[in-house]
Amino acid sequence: MKKQCAVVLAVLAGMLLASHVLAADPVKIGMITTLSTKAGYLGEDIRDGFQLAIDQEGGTLGGVPVDLLVEDDGAKPEKGKQIAERFEVKDGVKIMTGIVFSNVAMAVIPKVVRDGVVYLSANAGPSKLAGDMCNPNYFSVSYQNDNLDEVVGQYVTEAGFTNVYLLAPNYPAGKDHLAGFKRYYKGNIAGEVYTKLDQSDYAAEIAGLRAAKPDAVFFFLPGGMGINFLKQYAQAGLQQEIPLFGPAFSFDERILGAVGEAALGVKNGSQWSHDLDNPANKQFVEAFKKAYGRTPTLYASQGYDTARLIASALKKTGGIADLDAFRAALKKADFESVRGNFSFGTNQHPVQDFYIREVIKTENGYTNKTIKKVFSNHVDAYADQCSM
Amino acid sequence: MLLFLEQLLNGLQLGITLFLMSAGLTLVFGIMRVINLAHGSFYMIGAYVGATAMATTGSFLLGLAAALPAAALVGMAVEWLVLRHLYDRDHLDQVLATFGLIMFFNESARMIWGRQPLFMDVPSWLAGHVTIVDGLSYPVYRLAVIVAGLAVAVFLWFLFARTRLGMRIRAGATNREMVGALGVNISLLYTLVFGLGALLAGLAGVMAGPILAVESGMGESILILTFVVIVIGGIGSVKGAVVGALLVGLVDTLGRAFLPTLLRLAFDSSTADTAGSSLASMAIYILMAMVLLWKPSGLFPVQSA
């Protein structure tokens, strides 16, 4: 009996010691992101933006030492799941972030937030997670996916276009993005075309588009698809005739560096741009250029904001021993966002401003210029479905 | 009507590109009995080398002049280093080995040229549009692709039907032991045929460069279509490759262009758009299934020993 008591005491003492050691450890942040494949630069920018915030504080966020673990999901849901599992079980990670693609997000996030991990999205914002699958442990620091289409829909309507042609790949996100546009667009739809996913030649669609004679074209074609479409659209001589609109995804600074001339004049919707006039943004763009030698993209700004948000919460709580307090501190969003206005709505998605940008040419190459703020303190369309 | 004509030309242009790809692939299969999944990599190499040469020299013709030998040389090196050892092996081994080659080439392209796509401009002497009939103007460059592809088809016909080399290649396809016994250096012949196949793929790649983005992995999407073409045409038959490529090019383009409109006659517009685009992306596979039901070994099967 005595022996057993001694053993139990020893174990208890050991546990106390262990938890003490744990508290002194840096806070682990698990970043699952896409560093390989064609879209690898998206993950790089999220990671580099996030790392910049840590470096600016000398290895801490909000004065608390952090340990950033980065893993590449290769844009594959299965791989993302495996990494999340390893972060949770082996590394004991309580904060995760970084996923680029919505399909990977849907494979990972619902499970990890159920397990009590706090997930902060630095890019993907699938509608399910904003609506009926919202969760107290899930925060989107970027947007809800179709926000960037809504702002274009509103702008196109305000600008007086009444006959718009729509184009997107035939997969769920393609339909979501067009739905976002149509939610705010009031005019007639000249045609609605869904192309094959990963299609590379758009000759047939462009010929059909020209025949439909719209007064504007709205397209959502992420990554290489958008690049090919833009080139062929310019080659068909339509660039000067029918104005093009789209969400910011095909017009980040790294794509523009490659597409150049063919994207000139295209107007796109975004919640951020490198020329937004606020002190936090000026400081961020300068520091990012100095650290990495390139202009930050939308994705970099989202990575940076995510880290700064975590910093603001850690500053208040001193750590994540009390997850409830940490969550409450996150929800206050008490930080200077590089986008200016930023707060969380009831579904823990951002309430923020949205802008229309135009692709212009400067002596340093092609870039975006903010031309108009369209929405102020805009709330996404799914917030009502969230019962939080 | 004009729109239909324009889409016909678009389909023809896609078909021609597919023909350049499938001619090489079907030659290699017909003569060497080897399945080469890495054929798309030669397309990619042609595009990359062409884009790089064009960026440094500013001339599309010099880009072409650099890309073709580069693709052919890489093709011959692959035959010599890898495939030569697989001729007597199972098709599954060949598939595995050449699948490995795809990854090798994609990763190499990323290491050499980086992750960002490269761009080729349409050469200035092929830029702009030409009016074909009143009201229908078509990009000169796409017309040039059609003309170049037709020229290659004529050249291949001449090579096979009218030259001694072509005769040996045809003989080698029918009975390689006999041809070897007659004193023809069959392994050199194989390397040459493989180089020719790679060269045609490189040509397709460099011609696609100004239309598409040149990026790592660009060979895979066209490879699938290419396989559909040679399955429809009959594996090993160049004539089959011509007919199959034109069929696939036309069905794919016309399906994409007109199926949604056709369905709109029967359904409301949003159902028609969704169903039409889904059907359009299935169209070539439906075509393939129908051809195989009717002629299980393709439209122009090749008999060989």
Image: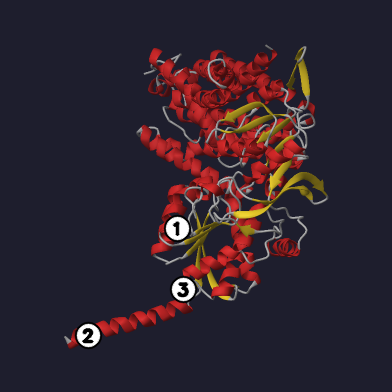
- Residue at the spot x=70%, y=40% of the render? A154
How far apart are the alpha carbons under marks 2 and 1?
38 Å
Decide: is B256 above or below A199.
above
- Of residues A79 and A325, the one nearer the viewer is A325
Q: Position of residue B150 (x, y in %)?
A: 63, 17
Q: Position of residue B215 (x, y in %)?
A: 61, 41
Q: Chain of mark 2?
A: A
Question: Is disc 3 placed on a helix, strand or loop?
Answer: loop
Q: Chain of mark 1?
A: A
Q: Which mark is residue A5?
A: 2
Label 3 and label 1 in one chain = yes
Q: Which residue is mark 1?
A: A113
Q: Amino acid at mark 3?
A: Ala
- Residue at the spot x=59%, y=76% of the render? A63
Q: Which mark is residue A321?
A: 3
Question: Is disc 2 placed on a helix, strand or loop?
Answer: helix
Any part of residue B267 in sight: yes
Q: Position of residue A210 (x, y in %)?
A: 71, 23
Question: Which of pointers 2 and 1 lies earlier in the amino acid sequence?
Answer: 2
Q: Amino acid at mark 2?
A: Cys
Question: Which of pointers 3 and 1 lies earlier in the amino acid sequence?
Answer: 1
- Of residues B118 and A280, the one nearer the viewer is A280
- Picture quarter with the N terminus of chain A: bottom left
Q: Chain of mark 3?
A: A
